[in-house]
């Protein structure tokens, strides 16, 4: 419903402001530019970026560098799903990329639609000659 959508949008904006802190204006400009360029909903872009920022900062990455990474990974997720529709939604791409970045590579392996998981399972061991 409209009320639920408005509530989710407000929650996204609150989280966005909380995780970007003094970088909020710059991050908002980045999210809006990405949304405009890709024809996506700005609230969705903000949600993805906030999720990534909330992952990177606790890992010890400086907030400004984390913002740049959040934008880059969000853009990558959109690119991956745009060029490879079989990979699923942008939401699924963000979840898999975030999971892989924190060390849970099984998520990407289990997602058989991902090119890396297909190619790694079909590779034969090779002998290295020195």
Image (cartoon, helix red, strand yellow):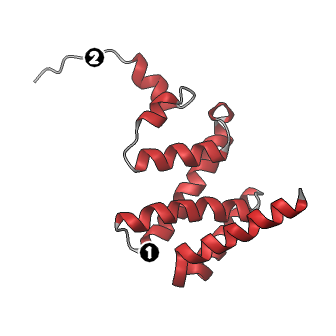
Q: Mark 2 or mark 1, which is nearer the start of the sequence?
A: 1
- Indicate left or right for 65 with 2 as reference: left
Residue on which disc 1 sits: 63
- Indicate left or right for 71 with 9 as reference: left
- Indicate the position of residue 94 as horizontal and vertical percent values: 57, 49
CA gap between label 1 and label 2 equals 41 Å
The residue depicted at 25 percent of the width and 17 percent of the height is 126
Relative height, residue 15 to residue 2 (above, below) = below
- Indicate the position of residue 92 as horizontal and vertical percent values: 61, 42
Relative height, residue 110 to residue 82 (above, below) = above
**45 or 81, nearer to the observer:** 45
- Indicate the position of residue 62 as horizontal and vertical percent values: 38, 73
- Indicate the position of residue 115 as horizontal and vertical percent values: 51, 30
Query: Which residue occupies the extreme bottom position in the image?
Result: 22
Secondary structure beneath dot 2 equals loop
As drawn, the label of residue 125 is: 2
The residue depicted at 36 percent of the width and 45 percent of the height is 103
Question: Which quarter of the rendering shows the C terminus?
Answer: top left
The residue depicted at 43 percent of the width and 44 percent of the height is 100
Q: Residues within 10 Å of mark 1 (few under 14, many from 20)?
A: some
Disc 1, disc 2: CB below 8 Å?
no
Residue 14 in sight from this viewpoint: yes
Query: Which residue occupies the extreme left position in the image?
Result: 130
As drawn, the label of residue 99 is: none
Q: Quadrant of residue 56?
A: bottom left
Residue 36 in sight from this viewpoint: no
């Amino acid at each position: 419903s409209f009320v639920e959508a408005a509530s989710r949008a407000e929650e996204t904006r609150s989280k966005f402001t909380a995780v970007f802190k003094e970088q909020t204006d710059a991050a908002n400009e980045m999210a809006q530019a990405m949304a405009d360029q890709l024809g996506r909903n700005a609230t969705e872009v903000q949600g993805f970026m906030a999720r990534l920022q909330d992952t990177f900062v606790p890992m010890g990455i400086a907030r400004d560098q984390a913002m740049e990474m959040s934008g880059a990974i969000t853009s990558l997720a959109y690119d991956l799903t745009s060029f490879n529709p079989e990979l699923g939604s942008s939401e699924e791409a963000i979840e898999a990329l975030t999971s892989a970045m924190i060390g849970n590579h099984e998520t990407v392996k289990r997602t058989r639609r991902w090119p890396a998981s297909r190619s790694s399972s079909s590779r034969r061991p090779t002998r290295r000659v020195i």
